[in-house]
Amino acid sequence: MALVVLVVHEDRPEAVAQADALAAALIDDSHQVERSDDPRFAANGLDDATDLVVSLGGDGSILRAVDLLAGRRSPILGVNHGELGSLTTVEPTEAYSSVVRALAGDHDLEERMMLRVEVQRKVGGGVTEVVAHALNEVVVERRATDGEAGGQTVRVGVTLDGEPFTSYAADGLIAATPTGSTAYAFSARGPIVDPLHRSIQLTPVSPHMLFDRTLVLDPSTEVGIEVLGPRAATCTVDGRPVADLAGGDRVVCTAAERVARLVTFGPRDLRGLLVDRFGLADR
């Protein structure tokens, strides 16, 4: 008997319906099933003994599953109920058979690099720290406040391994993993990086300066981002708000010890994924 956790996109009826059917089938097979849309799950959290996490949704549901795992090494199988699903592995028609294969060990695993994100905020004369982890990216970006024009930029200073690099005046700054290179960083004109590569990409968003290129850094690099001046900023990790930032607050990004373990069946076809996602075959 295995313990399977279903992470369900609750706003997609087709994903909820498939979760119902999949849970019933797995219980009939004598497996134990827990669901993220069950109120009891919110109270108890994810069990350390979880054998497989099945995400039913899009890439956002995969990111949620990674966050729920909080460093546990349980593998994640993504069932695509989204638009493109670059992180998901199988289509809904293959869900049950793929879960059976995964539980039988008939699968491959991709280990994706993650970032450890430490937010250091100056509060009340001291420093408070918030730690989070990102599979896609961490973003420090401007935050409009009452009476402030929406077009204002934020100024941040960047250090690399503790040494000053430069300051950016921009809408924001993205530190992305290779997995996240095709997410927010791509929309900011960052490079596409093979998701199995290990590096940190630092990409400014709408920079107001001559130097506007992405830096592709060694994964051992410590990237420090400090808010300069009085303008408010915010830090988000994989789309989740983590902290509001003020002048002097810092965000430090390093390669995490934890990884995301994604179930695949054979090598992932990066070429095919890019062709489908960006309509390259029609050119």
Image (tube, rainbow, N blue to C red):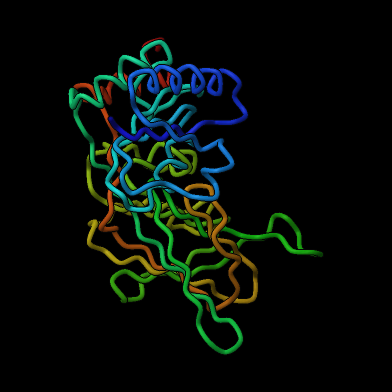
Q: Quadrant of the N terminus?
A: top left
- Residue pictured at 42% horizontal, 67% vertical: 118
- At which x and y percent is residue 267? 19, 24
- Nearest to the observer: residue 130 or residue 229: 130
- At which x and y percent is residue 90? 35, 19
- Residue pictured at 69% horizontal, 55% vertical: 151
Q: Is 228 left, or right, of 283 in this rendering?
A: right
Q: Is 155 left, or right, of 194 in this rendering?
A: right
Q: Inspect this view and state whether residue 242 appears.
A: yes
- Residue pictured at 60% horizontal, 64% vertical: 233
Q: Residue furthest bottom?
A: 125
**Residue 220 appears in which quarter of the rendering?**
bottom left
- Residue pictured at 29% horizontal, 35% vertical: 262
- At which x and y percent is residue 237? 48, 53
Q: Inspect this view and state whether residue 189 appears.
A: no
- At which x and y percent is residue 221? 26, 63
